[in-house]
Image (cartoon, rainbow, N blue to C red):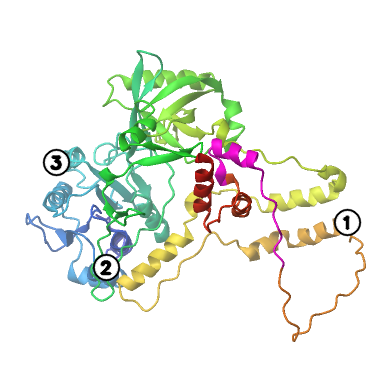
Amino acid sequence: MHLRLCTPRKTMVDPSFKMCFAVLRTTSSRRLLITTPTSPPSSSTEPSKKSQNSHSFEHIYIYQDLEAPYARRISDLEAFEQSPDSFERDIGSSDEYAFHEALWICNTLFSKAAKKQDSKRIFLLTNNDNPNAGKIDLQRSAMTRANDLHDTGAILHLFYLKPPGREFDYDVFFKDKIVKMEEDDTGTNHHDATGKLDDLLKQVRQKEFKKRTAFRIPFILGDDFEFGVQGYNLVAETKLGTYTYLVAATNEEVAVVTSYICKTTAQQLSVSDMDSYYLYGGKKVVFSKEEVAAIKTFGEPGLRLIGFKPLAEVLRKPYYNLKHSSFLFPDEEGYSGSSAVFIQFLARVSALQKAVICSFVPRKNATPRLVALLPQLEEFDGKGNVLRPSGFHLIHIPFSDDVRKPPAPEFDSTIRIPILQEAIGVVGEMIDKTTLKNFSCDNYENPTIQKHYENLQAIALKRDMAADFFDHTLPNEAAIQKRIGRLVARLEDTLPEPEVPQSIPSTPRKRKQVSDPPTPRKKEKVAPPSSEDVKALWENGQLKKLTVVSLTAFLLSVGVAPAKKKDDLIQQVDDHFSA
């Protein structure tokens, strides 16, 4: 889908299709490396001079079927990416296509896929903002096919290039007719791909994580009043994939089996044969599996209102956030009318500048957490697109048991180190010259993960070396030196010379000769703890607070031959007082 430029032979085919194959190569490579039993396969469909599809539609060419990627497919994509002339020669491109037929082919590929997809996504790369312009019937058919795809759970993402001499008009055809927002999507499904290819590939990689609800629970405001909310994790740490054990001789996968062995009889046990115990007062308090589950149960899942607190007081301590936050939307499916109650509640809380303090149980058998809900109202850009959706940020705040208070300083630093106004001025200039004006964490990829993927890709594709990647976390030392190099020298001049403490002269120690025999270290005798103290710890189940040395000394004092391991020593003390 492209538009021709003024010169007859010059088209947008080369750059647009180069981007297309680069996107396919990138997504296929990542799925080859991060594949799971439910990883979505990939395919490519192009408007072309030739035709290759199951419905014999003209000018639609399926270059690769919808299946899990492997090394050969990625190599073929790289070959086309490196030589765009071969694409024009072997497949070609054409403007004489029906857009609805391309969407029909996509739906057919999804339905015939061998594996069930956990997500169905279609990436549209085009610089044509009005396909099949002037052909109302074809455009209506395209809207119908897009609705069919949307009803089956498929998501269409538009990556557009700017047409020559003007801007891409997203509203004329694609907005809400072809590309639709998901009900639970907090972002956007259309992106400006004009510019650097690396920026486009970064946008595509970011779209590989499908947004799913982390929990669906009731928000309980009172005894008989509740409405539904659903939470999403907007931030979550991306971790390396897990490895699988293989048999070295055959490369066959190893089946991992966990077995439990009785410590006394060496008999293999099943889960039903075992109980659990907690040490209390020096005695083993035994619980069954059902009793342990009942101990960990704190009621049904839900958000329960505790009260309200000024928003400024909660924001004053951002370091109290124990883990990544979640974002709350109304859950209309589970509780009819939740959206109306949610919006009114959100608007009033936001107007009063309050934070909502709640008890949070996300799922069954989960421990309750103390959370604060921070309100956020919708924000729009100049074109009416949503920049920030309406909802609550759910922040995990600590219990009193979780707060750690550092020791107070032993001296007043302002007395020891005087504040120098000249030095403060130099440091202020350094801060001004190194301030990041357009900082965004979206511009920093995890170097550990990127290096891991590049090495895996090199091994999977049988390459001699892994491709180089740029580590954005490394500082630009040359630029920093250029900006604040002279200021560092000025700062050194403004600071006073450090006082060197006077060293006490010490008499030189005689070096030991190599031939001298080593002097054996004397073991220091440790006084055994009193019987009353040990018994008090035993009664409170706190024998683990004693060290191995203390336990050994106590057992020797009462005439018991001590064992070597701490658990055995504790058992000996337990037996001593139990007798």
Image quarter hosting the N terminus? bottom left
Horizontal side of 370 relative to 502 (left or right) equals left
Looking at the rendered structure, the secondary structure element under dot 3 is helix
Residue 74 disc label: 2
Horizontal side of 323 relative to 82 (left or right) equals right
Residue extent of the magenta highlight? 522-544
Task: Give yes or no for residue 353 being in the magenta stretch.
Answer: no
User: In x, y percent, where is residue 251?
Assistant: 25, 72
- On the question of residue 196 being in view, the answer is no
Closer to the N terminus: mark 1 or mark 3? 3
Looking at the rendered structure, the secondary structure element under dot 2 is helix
Residue at point 20% right, 62% down? 93
- On the question of residue 114 being in view, the answer is yes
Nearest the viewer among 197 and 365 is: 365
Task: Give yes or no for residue 542 being in the magenta stretch.
Answer: yes
Determine which residue is flagged by label 3: 141
Determine which residue is flagged by label 1: 496
User: In x, y percent, where is residue 113?
Assistant: 14, 53
Pair 1/2: label in front: 1
Q: Is residue 543 above or below residue 13?
A: above
Is there a contact, CB below 8 Å, between mark 1 and mark 2? no
- Decide: few, some or many residues near mark 3? Use Cα within 10 Å; few <14, some 14-19, many ≥20: some
Residue at point 43% right, 30% down? 368
Per the model, the C-alpha gap separating discs 1 and 3 is 79 Å
Closer to the N terminus: mark 1 or mark 2? 2
Amino acid type at mark 3: Ser
